[in-house]
Structures are given as structure tokens and as C-alpha cells.
Amino acid sequence: MSSEAPAVVCVMPTRDRHVFASRAVDLFRRQTYPNKALMVVTDGAPLDIPNPVFPGGFIFQNPRPPTRDGIGSLVDNIRYAIKLLTMGGYFGATHVAFWEDDDWYHPERLAFQMSQVGDAPAHGYPFTNYYHIGTSMRWEGPHPERASNNGTLVRRDWLIKNGYPDTRYPDVDLWKSIRGGVLSGNPHKPHCIGIKHNHGGLGAGHRGMCTTPDAGWGWLSSKIDDESLEFYRSLGHAAED
């Protein structure tokens, strides 16, 4: 990667959710940050990624043998990716960002986080937004002391020293172990929204805390781009709740 901006590697674990994962790749391409890479780690069929090298970034895949089913598969893929990032040079990357294969991201996510993190070990958003596309139900709430995994960016040297927690809730325990991390962002203009759905298993179908109705998809349409909205609406209408 060639740019005066510090390099960021985004880690995207996935497994046999090609429709969502392809959308996540497109959302990565739209990031305005000028020096970035996306590492796709899968223990299922690899993605078809045309034009993996583009101005300001590139995309590469690291397949691995299957381990276990369910959400544990994605967690194992994250740990595998972190292990690779702490062993190799990886283009001089200074930061690692977590990139979920089925969530929505604003084009300014990486640029904003890199503008905020400074010399701190991590940056995250002190709030979370979830949307269940099968029922048009949403949830939003604060995280005053930590960020969700899908909105976390960490210094690579911190990960080399401390690793990724090998616990039941690694995203929670990651922020418990970070000292001096920065939490900032506008809850009314989120840079990431966790998408809940009924496609591809891996625990994605549960509605969880999404209990507030969104009549006519009005809330979601005010937060995301029109193309992504139509994508989620088409899958939501096809889902069985």
C-alpha cells in the first residue's frame, strides 16, 4: 500500500454467506480512507472478488480449514486473522479494523476512526445500532465503556502485545483489556449498523434486542445509502421470520 496515510487492514471473517459478504466487500471499496486493505478469512467456499486491487486499497483472501459450526466459526476466523497479522509485516499496517460480513458501513468509517484514534490503542463508537431486515425492527443504545466488534479499530502493535481474547465474549473482553481507548461518534449518524437477518445461519437470524418497529423502513432509510437500502429490503421481503 502506498500512501502517506497510515495503513489499515480490515479483518472480515465469513463462511458461506456470499450475498452479504459481497455487499460488505463493496462497502469496503467505498471507504474514502486512502490506504487500506481487506483480509477476507473463510473456512467455507472462497468469495469471487473481481478487481481486488483498486485506487487506495486492495482485497485478499486467506482460506483456512473448517473448524466448528455456527458463530464459533466466525470467531475462529477472527483469531486466525489476528494471528496472521501479528506474525507478518502486512504492508506496514499500523491499525486493524474489524469488518463484519453482513453489516452496513458508512464510507467515512475508516477515515473518521483514524482521525480520532491518535496515539490511543483503539477507537470505537460508544453506541450500537441493530436492524432486523426480516421484521423491520430496530434497536439503538449506548455503550459508554466499550464498542461493538463491528465498530472497533485497534493498533496493530497493541494486538501483537496483547492478542485477541480467547473467551466466550471476545469483543467485550477486548475492550475490558484496553486502557485509554477513544470512544466517539454521532449516534444519530452511525457509521456502522449491525444487520440481523434469516440468511446463512451462524446465529444471524435471531432478532435479539430489535424490538422497535420501523414503519416503512423510514429509520433505516435515513441512515444508509439508497442502494444498500434496496439490497436489504429485497432480502428482508424474501426472509421467513
Image (spheres, rainbow, N blue to C red):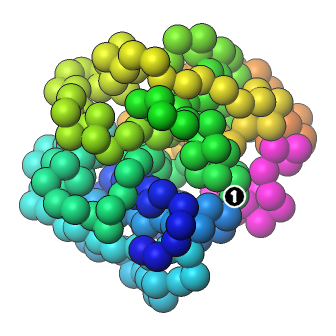
What percent of the width, then of the height, locates residue 176?
Answer: 36, 13
Q: Report the residue at 44% width, 82% height from top.
A: 52
Q: Report the residue at 76% width, 27% height from top.
A: 187
User: Is residue 224 found inside the magenta-colored segment of the image?
Assistant: yes
157 relative to 208, above or below: below
- Name the residue that disc number 1 marks: 107
95 relative to 135, above or below: below
Quadrant of residue 186 within the rendered picture:
top right
Q: Amino acid at mark 1?
A: Pro
Q: Position of 174 compared to 10: left or right?
A: left
Q: Which secondary structure class fits the magenta region best?
A: helix
Q: Quadrant of the C terminus?
A: top right
**Part of the protein shown in magenta:** 221-235
Q: Quadrant of the N terminus?
A: bottom left
Asked whether residue 181 is in view, the answer is: yes
- Image label count: 1
User: Is residue 36 found inside the magenta-colored segment of the image?
Assistant: no
Q: Report the residue at 20% width, 67% height from top.
A: 63
Quadrant of residue 171 within the rendered picture:
top left
What percent of the width, then of the height, locates residue 86?
Answer: 19, 49
Q: Report the residue at 61% width, 29% height from top.
A: 125
Q: Position of 33 compared to 180: left or right?
A: right
Mark 1 surroundings: few (<14), some (14-19) or many (≥20) residues within 10 A = some
Please state which of residues 178 and 51 is positioned toward the viewer in this rendering.
Answer: 178
What percent of the width, then of the height, locates residue 80?
Answer: 18, 50
